Image: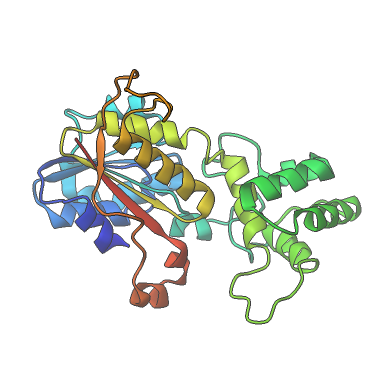
Amino acid sequence: MVREVVEGLETKLEGWFVDCTLGMGGHSLALLESNSGASVLGIDRDNEALAIAQARLSAFGGRFMAVHADFKEVERWSDALPEAPVGILADLGLSTYQLKAGRGFSFSDDSSLDMRMDIGVGQPASEFLSGASEERLKEVLWKYGEEPHARRIAAAICAARSEAPIKDAATLASIVAGVVPKKPGRRLHPATRTFQALRIFVNRELEGLGTFIRMAVDALRPGGRIAVLAYHSLEDRIVKRTFRELCNGCTCPPELPVCVCGKEPSLRLVFRGAGRPSTEEVKRNPASRSARLRVGEKL
């Protein structure tokens, strides 16, 4: 949804934009090309992807800067900016690079089951699968993947690892596919929710997401915009709830006759609901089918 993101961020405004999830630099490239008065600070916790994007965008000189960080570290990256940004983008999905990097994000990856976006931080998925109890596995699959067959899959994983360690994504995908009931016309791979759950858990993707949005809005200059692309209901619920909270302002219980918290709205929705990819884009890029775009403007 590159076009929708660029339009939503109103890139005719001059100043700094923050691409919180730089990836290979596709959104940053579009932002820089759309407005000669725009500059971009790109952030990514994946050093390898960061190097690729830096090389790709080097032609823009001082109009592009990159920072190796988790995008939720707002104070860290905002200190790198010479002024308050006019736009902030957070694309919460996997980048094309990560899917092809051999880290276990792809169902067909037969060399790894790492799933970390920053390979220097945290526990690989393979280590978690090797040591977690069956009950813990079930809990993670249900909580972060909303997997209805979580108990069956957890049992299958435990049975398989008793025979041999589960070291690659292709093996895990096969284990899951072997126990998830087949449905006629199923579009998604049967291991989709399992992989989603493990990726979210390993990278702690949902932790602090609401706080990030609040801090990012605080960092924006008045009239600046924040755009968030979510790809599954768990993260989109957090985005939707936080946007609504910032638009409402007051957090007093509804039974109180007057406001006592004193909080004022700090955001307005640029459009109601969530933007979705066009039919043409979904045909061109099936991975975009679940994308939900929400955009807010700072008051």
Q: x, y percentage for residue 160?
A: 86, 56
Quadrant holding the C terminus: top left
Foreground residue, 247 or 159? Answer: 247
Foreground residue, 7 or 54? Answer: 7
Number of numbered labels in the structure image = 0
Foreground residue, 181 or 20? Answer: 181
Q: Quadrant of residue 78?
A: top left
Q: x, y percentage for residue 163?
A: 91, 55
Q: x, y percentage for residue 221?
A: 18, 32
User: What colouring style does the render use?
Assistant: rainbow
* Image height of 200 relative to 185, above or below: above
> At 62% across and 42% down in the image, what residue appears?
201
Q: Quadrant of residue 176?
A: bottom right
> At 29% across and 20% down in the image, what residue appears?
262
Q: x, y percentage for residue 212?
A: 40, 33
Quadrant holding the N terminus: bottom left
Q: Quadrant of residue 216?
A: top left
Q: Is residue 18 visible?
A: yes
